[in-house]
Amino acid sequence: MATSVRRTTLTLPTAPLGPDNPLPALRPLDEVHRVDDRVRATLPSDMARQVAHAPLRSVLPVRLRDGYGRDRAPATLDAIVLENDRLRATVLPGLGGRVHSLIHKATGDSAGTELLYRNPVLQPADFALNGAWFSGGIEWNIGATGHTTLSCAPLHAARVPAPDAAEGGAMVRLWEWERLRDLPFQVDLWLPADSAFLYVGVRIRNPHHLPAPVYWWSNIAVPEDAHTRVLAPADDAWHFGYARTLSRVPVPEWDGADRTYPLRGAYPADYFYEVPDGARRWIASLDADGSGLVQTST
């Protein structure tokens, strides 16, 4: 089938977001990924310089989103679907442009195989930089080392010509102005005919006369059980524990466990893989049969 892009709706049990806090966010931001001076002194000089560069002091001028509730009721959400013979992606433009679902149609049952963790409810929690955040799918984070202030906010969305427009292809463009760094950004999503990959192009513009500090990260939630394994082309990783320490550790075996199996860790932690220069950047989450999702970048 030719690639299609269409609007639809999605109904989920949803807790109300409620109003934004009318008071200014004057409290200093206690960002969990900050490392202290003693730890930073042990890091390579370029890393030490970057992790200490222009940290956020608060979320001003953004308002806090702390008015959400706990009582869920069915709600209709605007959605955009991109689909070809192999994949079907569902995007929620009203909730940070989140990719809610990515289905591989050729495997699994008649409904295909869900490659992401698809949250069956929409329940905000205090996990974004400014409060309300929800789990699941693929999210786009810009501005700082935290879940974006746009996690539960609408983005602009439009259907525009895709890079293969000569063949009649179309893609979805999401965009907004990120107020923490005062920069506009866009995310393009397209699905060429017969492609087994969802393509994503990200652009951040700086309309100002001075350089702007930016930290961009894409966060993908995947199904997880005791057999789930996360692989990347690296022999080392930077381990960040929530005691705010950052240290280089070997991959896969470290401290008596194979850390490529996330559930074998006793405590939550981040692993930033040290991919060698010149190597293709990729990371994969695989199940017991070796099937799953791969993310790669040029």
Image (cartoon, rainbow, N blue to C red):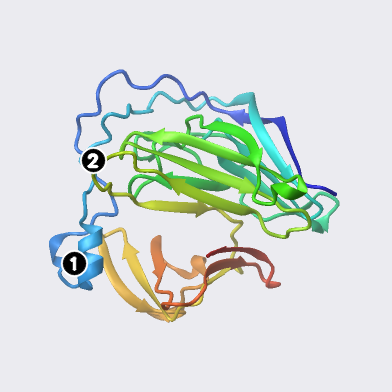
**Image-quadrant location for residue 91:** top right
Residue 63 in the image: x percent, y percent? 32, 26
Residue depicted at x 47% and y 79%: 252
Measure the C-alpha gap from mark 1 to mark 2: 20 Å
Q: Would you call the spot at circle 2 few (<14 residues within 10 Å), some (14-19), or many (20 or more)?
A: some
Residue 170 lies left or right of residue 279; in this view the side is: right
Q: Amino acid at mark 1?
A: Val
113 left or right of 1 in image: left
In the rendered image, is residue 120 in sight? no
Mark positioned earlier in the residue sequence (1 or 2):
2
Q: Measured from the top left, where is residue 227 in percent x and y? A: 61, 69
Left or right? Give the position of 268 relative to 210: right
Callout 2 amino acid:
Leu
Judged from the image, the secondary structure of the residue bearing numbered disc 1 is: helix
Point 53% across, 33% down: residue = 95
Q: Tell me where residue 19 sits by quadrant.
A: top left
Q: Residue 29 — which label?
A: 2
Q: Quadrant of residue 159?
A: top right
Tally of numbered discs: 2
| Residue 174 seen | yes
Query: Horizontally, is 36 left or right of 141 in the view?
Result: left
Q: Would you name the residue on which mark 1 appears?
A: 39
Give residue 112's mark: none
User: Looking at this view, is 174 or 115 the one in front?
Assistant: 174
Q: Are marks 1 and 2 in contact (CB under 8 Å)?
A: no
Which residue is painted at 24% across and 23% down in the image?
A: 24
Crowding at dot 1, Cα within 10 Å, few <14 / some 14-19 / many 20+, comes out as few
Q: Residue at x 53, y 68 (%)?
A: 282
